[in-house]
Amino acid sequence: MNHVVPALGIIFQQSFYRNIALVTFLVVAYLSYWLINQTTTIPIFLEMMQTGEFGKFSLLYGITYIIATFLITVLSGISIAVMVWLYSHSKLGKGKTVGANAGGLIAAAFGMGCPVCGTFLLSATGIAGGLTIFPLQGLELKFLSIALLMGSTLYALSKVKTAVHCTDCADITHRSLEVKKPTGKRLIILPLEKLALASLIVAFSVNQFLITQTAAQMGLATGKLAQLLGIQSTNAKKIIAPKMNPDGRTTSLVEQPTITEVLANPRTGDALADARVVMIATGKPFYAPDDISFDDPINAQKKWGAYEKSISLSADLEQRYQWFISNMVCSYCCGGPTSVTTINRCGCAHAKAARGFFKFMLQNYSDTYSNDQLLGEGHRWYAIWYPKGMLEDYLLATGNEQALTHQTHGGAGTDGRHGL
């Protein structure tokens, strides 16, 4: 270990490598933030730490997770800077450092998430259960990442002294750009430092472009109808759903806040596919008990429905509950275009499930979320029970009705288009 500090001193005495470490740190930190936000948010993660959602040692798990994530970002910056230095100064130790760095970053990426909310990359590869399939709920991936990054960094640093004193692998950036071969021909030596700097500038520019594109994609599709509705932009925690008009007979389409976060509109050019991304949630939300999940609509409908009779609310919560069931509409199975049906007057299974959902959420999260958030979240579940109707409404509101023709249903207005 005696070589570590001197080797780091040799490398980071040059501002070029300090800048590489800083840029890498920022990029990895941003990617970590982006990945965890695909399944949850940092405020919700911190809240779940404190409320024991991560198990018996919930607080310890959360603290360990945060420290491990920070160590990964720092080690990534140092490791990449050391690797670039070796590439510039020597032919030693490239394969092992590259492999271990890649392995560490991949392990870190798959570990981004939380055991309750899931992890984006594990879910994308079709692994059910997310981080809960690991005994330590995904911390194994964090520790593996740290071990690989630290191992690759120490290995690379052990080669620094050798590279400095090696005449065959001396720093080519300190040599003349033109070296004569014994044959008299000139050998052009490329300035690796300048090339590496240019590459970093290009990579950083591309990253900034992608961030800008992602920000743009956080908005819903625009158009005349969307502008009339005031639906200009949204984040991934909102949904478009029907809201009862003051006349008590028809509905309008409005943007409503939700609890569950979904991916932003990817704008692939396929309006229907994009609508599914924005409207149809997947996985198990952190608040759902037992095995209730967006991925199993029938089971969710049955399990939520059971809470309608099993939960008794206090007087003040009962008053809020009555507001929900008299404002949540059954637009997709009951009523007519000018005669809306609310879930307090509907006997269908999905209405029963919605009533049970509101009772459960009021009993457990009444002080956490507003009425608007809970109402919007109720529509998250309606989207898996009546996906066609919800997708029709979304496409209608965003000016893409041609992707899925809108059908008249309860409370849609005299023209069957929510008054649009």
Image (cartoon, rainbow, N blue to C red):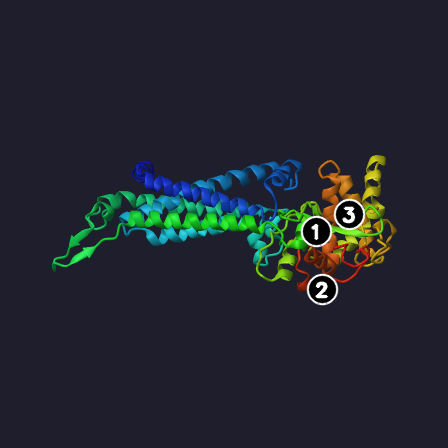
Q: Residues within 10 Å of mark 1 (few under 14, many from 20)?
A: many
Residue 273 visible (yes or no): yes
Secondary structure under the numbered disc 1 in the rendered image: strand
- Specify the amino acid type for callout 1: Ile
Label 3 sits on residue: 357
Q: Which mark is residue 405?
A: 2
Label 1 sits on residue: 240
Q: Which quadrant of the rendered structure holds the N terminus?
A: top left
Does residue 275 sit above or below 59 in this rendering?
Answer: below
Residue 112 visible (yes or no): no
Secondary structure under the numbered disc 2 in the rendered image: loop
Of the numbered discs 2 and 3, the one sitting upstream in the chain is 3
Q: Residues within 10 Å of mark 3 (few under 14, many from 20)?
A: many
Secondary structure under the numbered disc 3 in the rendered image: helix
- Name the quadrant containing residue 186: bottom left
Left or right: 297 in relation to 169: right
Whether residues under marks 2 and 3 lie with C-beta atoms below 8 angstroms apart, the answer is no
- Name the quadrant containing residue 162: top left
Which of 141/16 is in front?
16
Q: Which quadrant of the rendered structure holds the C terminus?
A: bottom right
Determine the CA span between mark 2 and mark 1: 17 Å
